[in-house]
Image (cartoon, rainbow, N blue to C red):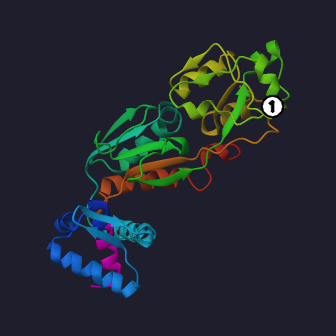
Amino acid sequence: MELSSRMILFAQVVEGGSFSAAARAAGHAPSAVSRQIALLEDGLGVRLLNRTQSGITLTEAGAAFHARCAEVAALVAEAEGAVAGLGAAPRGALRVAATVAFAKAQLLPILPAFLARHPEITLTLSLTDRPVDLAAENIDVAIRFTEQIGEAAVVARKLAHNRRVICAAPSYLAAHGTPQTPDDLARHNCLRLSSVARWNDWGLTGADGHPAPISGNFEANDADAVYHATLAGVGVARLSSYLVMEDIRAGRLTRVLPGYASDDSDIFALYLDRRNLLPRIRVFIDHLTAHFGPVPPWEREGG
């Protein structure tokens, strides 16, 4: 057995928690798996696993080596899936979850072209800002932001760069003035999101070195509602660049505190780390990547 095969087998042992589980996944006898791992350890000159009657645990070297083995296994699985999918027309049910605002502003407009190109795919779209469990909810692809990536067992493929931008409608600023420093926000109606707590950390520090106070009389559980409230002149909000850049260029919104750094919150496609990625999932992710990268539409002048 080649080194790469033993690395993949080692990853299966660690992820399965035992030689028996890895043997079932690989179609080998447990004794054969144990022998291959022993040969791997001999070749490397280090012990990767502690073997006891109660099971196996990783050594320090084993933990470091497993991270590399998992990467090799993922790359091989991706390559196998790509080759296997070349001769198969994408078909079947595709289940996608996306945040409400992103789906409305950026995803829905590009779905007609995707479905026209792949008429045998049936797409079901779930709009939610809450955390999703891909395996438990049978979701093929979830479109999420940096702050929402929590599962270690998923692949996160970056789709586009996105920034958080503080802005307000000209009508609000005309009535209440324009904040010049983070401390000025204490005297303004700052709109908040209740769905993801980290989105309410605006990353601004006051003159006293403490986080600038953010408070107001409006809160919603999705960014689309906060976006429309901002357009209506309700207050100041910190929103994604994918949502507001067109309005800023058109004069419907005005950037606030532009001299202060805006945080990145990139957009990712999440999917389960599995072998033989289904063609319908692969072509959907490829469609998103081709549309949004390397410079997303909202960051292009005139886009």
239 w.r.t. 20: above or below: above
User: Is the residue marked by circle 1 packed among few (<14), some (14-19), or many (20+) residues within 10 Å?
Assistant: some
Q: Residue furthest left?
A: 29
Q: From this viewpoint, is residue 81 visible? A: no
Residue 28 % position (x, y)? 16, 74
Where's the C terminus, which quadrant? Answer: top right
Residue 90 as seen in the image, left or right of residue 194 = left
User: How far across and how far down the image is residue 86, in percent?
Assistant: 31, 67
Start-end of magenta stretch? 1-11
Position of 134 relative to 182 (above/below): below
Is 246 in front, or is 189?
189
The quarter of the picture where residue 226 lies is top right
For the residue pair 223 and 228, the one nearer the viewer reads as 223
Check if residue 52 falls in the magenta segment. Answer: no
Q: Is residue 271 in view from this perspective?
A: yes
At a point 33% along the width and 68% down the height, the residue shown is 11
Identity of the residue drawn at 18% across and 66% down:
20
- Picture quadrant of residue 94: top left
Q: Residue furthest front?
A: 53
Task: Please report the residue visible at 50 percent of the width from the left and 28 percent of the height from the top.
Answer: 195
Query: How far across and down, in percent of the image, does residue 223 sit?
Result: 55, 28
In the rendered image, the quadrant that contains the N terminus is: bottom left
Q: Secondary structure at mark 1?
A: loop
- Give the residue type at disc 1: Gly
Quarter holding residue 237: top right
Which residue is under mark 1? 206
The residue shown at (54%, 26%) is 224
Given residues 251 and 65, the one toward you in this image is 65
Q: Position of residue 24 (x, y in %)?
A: 16, 65
